[in-house]
Amino acid sequence: MTDMSKTTAPRNSLLKQDARTVKRNRAEKRFKAYGIAAISAGMLMLMILLSTIIGRGTGAFQQTFLTLDVQLLEAKLDKNGNRDLEEIKKVSTFGYAPLMAAAMEEKVAQTGIVTDLEPKELGDILSKQAAAQLRDFVLENTDLIGTSVEFRFLTNSRVDGYVKGRVTRESIANDKNINVAQLDLVDALRADGALEKRFNLAFITGSDASDARPEAAGMGVSMIGSLFMMLVVLALALPIGVAASIYLEEFAPKNWITDIIEVNISNLAAVPSIVFGILGLAVFINYMHLPNSAPLVGGLVLTLMTLPTIIISTRASLKSVPPSIRDAALGVGASKMQSVFHHVLPLAAPGILTGTIIGLAQALGETAPLLLIGMVGFIASNPPDGIASGLMDPNSAMPAQIYEWAKRADPAFYERAWGGIIILLVFLVTMNAIAVMLRRRFERRW
Amino acid sequence: MGNFLNVAPTTLLVIVVLILTALAFFMARARAMAAAWGDARKLHSLPNYYGYNAAMMTAIPALFMLTIWLFVQPMMIQNSVISMIPQAAVSDGSSVNLVMSDVRRVANGLTTAVEAGALSADAARDISTATTDIRGLLAESGVALGSEVSAEVLNAAQRYRSMQATGQWLMTAAICVIALGGLFVAMRATTATFRARNMVERFILALLMIAASLAILTTVGIVFSMLFESINFFSLHPWQDFFLGDSWSPNFRGDSDLSILPLLWGTLYISIIALLVAVPIGLFAAIYLSEYANSKVRAVAKPLLEILAGIPTIVYGLFALLTVGPFLVNLFGRGENGILGVDWMSGATSVLTAGLVMGIMLIPFVSSLSDDIINAVPQSLRDGSFGLGATHSETIRQVVIPAALPGIVGAILLAASRAIGETMIVVLGAGAIARISPNPLEAMTTITTRIVSQLTGDTDFASPETLVAFALGLTLFVLTLGLNVMALYIVRKYREQYE
């Protein structure tokens, strides 16, 4: 039979596809390929995004430092020689500049580098923050006055950029802040080992810095601002959200008021975040006169924004507790309230917690409402000293700080913005991982 | 808000009320046990409920009254003091409110001076501008005043202080009486047959209801806060220009063109580009994941795609400004040095930049919503189609998608609403120039970026240039609300079909 069919194939053979089937099968393949292409496009975007963040942000965790031997001359820093902290404090950063200039010249002479740079140009290799750095160090170690210490100074952001490859000899043609001779010196100091790139803890723990000193800027203070905001959100959104969900899920009668509340909540979840910012500005700042830029106000705004998310996830986890639990509790004589608080709520707790963490993560990354209540546009310089000051004093928040850096003109700040994003994403990933873990660990299938 | 400065006596009062509350709990509990001769079974409710009931009765009315008092008293004092200030004392270019804030500052300054010991309490009540240099006196105790203190202001300040002191005493007395009264009533009610649990549960239910209605309160707050300021705006600026004008050029000396149309154009243009990116990719990804992919691929690809949704928008904004924008400039700009050798694009910010990046952000949004909807289409429909000899893709195109279409449209509408309200990507990626132009490589601006820029400048809060932000916000709210309601309605209606 096989032989026959090979030689005289009938018109509609099962073994040979007709033109229409070929076309249909091709369409099938194409359609599937579109799907694969779409998924890969999504993945590709994710990869590009993540690799950009990592590629451009990791640089911020390293900084170029120049190690110099500084003579802490008693005659300059403590004229009376009595080590009185108040008197030493009177010496401003200008008093420290000559010491650094001397140390710089000594270093150049010591390494045998030939350069025709002026002393001022030599000093410009160091950061504008360097004198303040040294002053802070001396104020903490007054017993070292009169000795020579080896001190690691921050270098100028252009020098840092040169070491990291962001700044090149070609790109500085019109740059007033640095010249080629200085870069030659930087190369020589690098070869000597005095100038090196190393891990920069100050980026994670430090405070923001002014436009002229990107090398000194850090995320620390804005992280504290974010922390206080999250505390406010947690303290308000969790109890209110759980209470609202319990009411809607367990007690609310099915009537038009309940309907309105439910429609309201699902709509609030989709209201643009900036609208919450306008609400915060109008109600909390203009009407209630709460202080501008305070993490308390930020927390209140983010609470309103996160509430719908928490309510929706809490209701889902309350719903997943089977009715038999409630019936059993009622059967042994508990009141409705007791059945909910003693039995349903504890069983729903892991789900509620997961939803809350995800809501908090969302709030942590939110920027737009914070712009309107003034959490940008100033330099968050000092960490707050206490809970009241942490809530009420002007501060920034992590995403607002990143935005602030992205707006500044110096590319050195862009690197810090990307680095800030890495820190922010580390927090978000951690929070989400905890949420996933909680879900895996405690989720019950009924 | 003068009273908010005298926190100490108020805090003390709250502590007193809380102590009374704790006392009420234990007293009522003990009384209930005594009424049942130590046998809890003879009581209607568990003994703790009697305690909770008494604590509730003590604390709630007192603290409620306290809150109201703290809001009302400053207003009443202010009204009474304002009537003392003659119209003549309000100098040109000033207002009653400014004079009032002077009064408050002097009053607080006097209090500080008394506390610092620079002034005796009697002296603070009796000094007058004729005999003493108030400004100098206060400066000594560390209170700096902007100008000399006039006799009227000083008198008003002294009145303010005395009224505040009286108010403070009245408040303390009233709150204590209310708390003790509550305690007394609760103790009287505590008998063995008293239904304490029902009382407590009714109260808890009320709390739950209040929490649930907070959602409505938020919406009302949003609408009213924007509505009032928008009405202010429209009383300063013609509505015809806002809705029908064709240019946006805020001018802080006044006489600005503030029309929403160029902003709306930019917003919609960027949103459409975003949807052109997100809808095909998101939809095909959803179709592949729900119809073709095996469970392994699904378990990997779905969470990975959803990472895109979890990334904060500031990250996308930075990505637009620093990566996508410069890339597009390299592609479409820079003349001979560019990749295409054309010079169509000058700056990194453009409609295309913002639109592309926003599209990436929306992919998981479209895909996960469509995924849910496609999965909700009953298997029997597919089986029927397969049985008639259709291929998989034919089934999807001709059976599954038409069945899921309303839901998919809903998902797209939700994505559109998200795109219109998105702020950070457009603030960083779209630019600040308001114009109506068909060229996607030009910078344009959106409603959200203008809200941010009008409200973050250091401008007079009563000028139309600032108030316009509220009108823009209200428009944005109405626009997104309309899209959401429509989408939810469509999705809901569709879901009912198959249940």
Image (spheres, coloured by chain):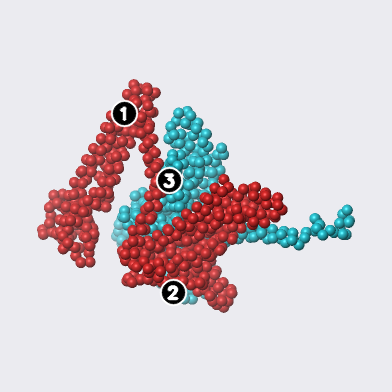
Chain colours: A cyan, B red
Q: Which chain contains the residue that carries disc 3?
A: A
Tally the marks: 3
Label 1 secondary element: loop
Label 2 CA crowd tier, 10 Å (few <14, some 14–19, many 20+): few
On the picture, is B405 further left or further right than A200?
right
Q: Is residue B310 visible?
A: no
The residue under the point 38% across, 58% down is A278
Residues at discs 1 and 2 both on one chain: no
Label 3 CA crowd tier, 10 Å (few <14, some 14–19, many 20+): few
| Residue B452 image point, x, y percent | 40, 63
- Between the residue at mark 3 and the residue at mark 1, the CA separation in whole angstroms equals 38 Å
On the picture, is B130 further left or further right than A33?
left
- Considering depth in this image, is A233 or A110 the residue closer to the camera? A233
Q: Amino acid at mark 2?
A: Lys
The residue under the point 43% across, 41% down is A252
User: In the drawing, what numbered circle is on residue A176?
Assistant: 2
The quadrant of the rendering that contains the C terminus of chain B is top right
Residue A243 lies, with reference to residue A4, above or below; the image says above
Which residue is label 3 attached to? A256
- Between the residue at mark 3 and the residue at mark 2, the CA separation in whole angstroms equals 69 Å
Which residue is label 1 attached to? B190
Q: Amino acid at mark 3?
A: Trp
The residue under the point 44% across, 30% down is A334
The residue under the point 47% across, 54% down is B485
Q: Which chain contains the residue that carries disc 1?
A: B
Marks 1, 2: nearer the viewer: 1
Nearer-N-terminus badge (3/2): 2
User: In the drawing, what numbered circle is on residue B214?
Assistant: none
